[in-house]
Amino acid sequence: MKISLIGSGRVAFHLAKVLLAQGHNIVQVYARDFDKTQKFAEKIQAKACQSLQDFQISDLIILAVSDSAIAELAKQVHELFPEILIVHTSGSTNIEVISHVHEKAGVFYPLQTFSFEREVDWSATPLFVEAIYKDDLILLSDLANSLSNRVYQYTSKQRLTLHLAAVFACNFSNYCFDMAKQVTDEEQVDFSLLYPLILETAKKATENDPKHMQTGPAVRGDQNILTMHQNLLAQAERDDLKQVYQLLSDGILQRHHSA
């Protein structure tokens, strides 16, 4: 399959690497920053294009770009290649954002957090595909199955629900880690002492119902400890952390102690 890739960010980078590793042909790549595009294209053995007009015919065009850029890029690509399947890689964007302007529309969404510094285990990464036409859905499913052992055909609404859940599970939890490090840094306490706790918490959440794994002063209803922690944050003049602490503690109390 000849694949064209638009984008040069984290998703595009990791997706291109695994596609190449699995023997797929990325013929060309385009992104706004041409210098960055050239360096990216060299790594994935593809042609760097200065504009979409430089694109050649391919079997699939992947829009691995920000959500806000999908609609306009789909329109531009449609004007050049009205018969080619176009997909985006977003978890929160409805397929209609493409299908509204281009009939052969699809989605190819990896549910994963991507960083340039870390490799991704694609075989365990859930991949979600969607398409307007059955033949296109089969093509995307085959492509996904060549990368991952976990491939699902989800609707845009289901995918949006997963994306929301992912923000809680990934983005918000990582911010909690960040806040924890701010607290330890304040008193020059070694943050790495929390590593075993962080890993065990994640392990329990993936092996059991997270509700049943909840621990801590809030689930126990220990108001003395809750007040002590809030006073400590107040003394450190960290009203921002105090507000988050109060909000999360209230949520845990309501979840576990409401009638």
Image (cartoon, helix red, strand yellow):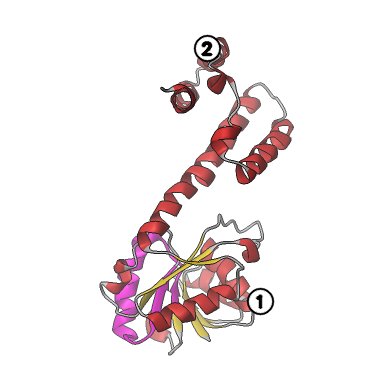
As helix, strand or loop, the secondary structure at mark 2 comes to: helix
Task: Judge whether residue 51 can be spotted in this image.
Answer: no
Q: As displayed, is residue 72 above or below residue 80?
A: above
Q: What residue would you read off at disc 1?
A: 21
Nearer to us of marks 2 and 1 is 2
Q: What residue would you read off at disc 2?
A: 223
> Is 76 inside the magenta-drawn segment?
yes
The spot of residue 10 in percent (x, y) is 54, 61
> Which quarter of the picture shows residue 225?
top right
Q: Amino acid at mark 1?
A: Ala
As helix, strand or loop, the secondary structure at mark 1 comes to: helix
How many marks are shown on the rendered structure? 2
Residue at position x 40%, y 52% from top?
161
In this picture, which residue range is highlighted in magenta? Answer: 61-88
The spot of residue 93 in percent (x, y) is 36, 61
Extreme residue in the bottom direction: 57
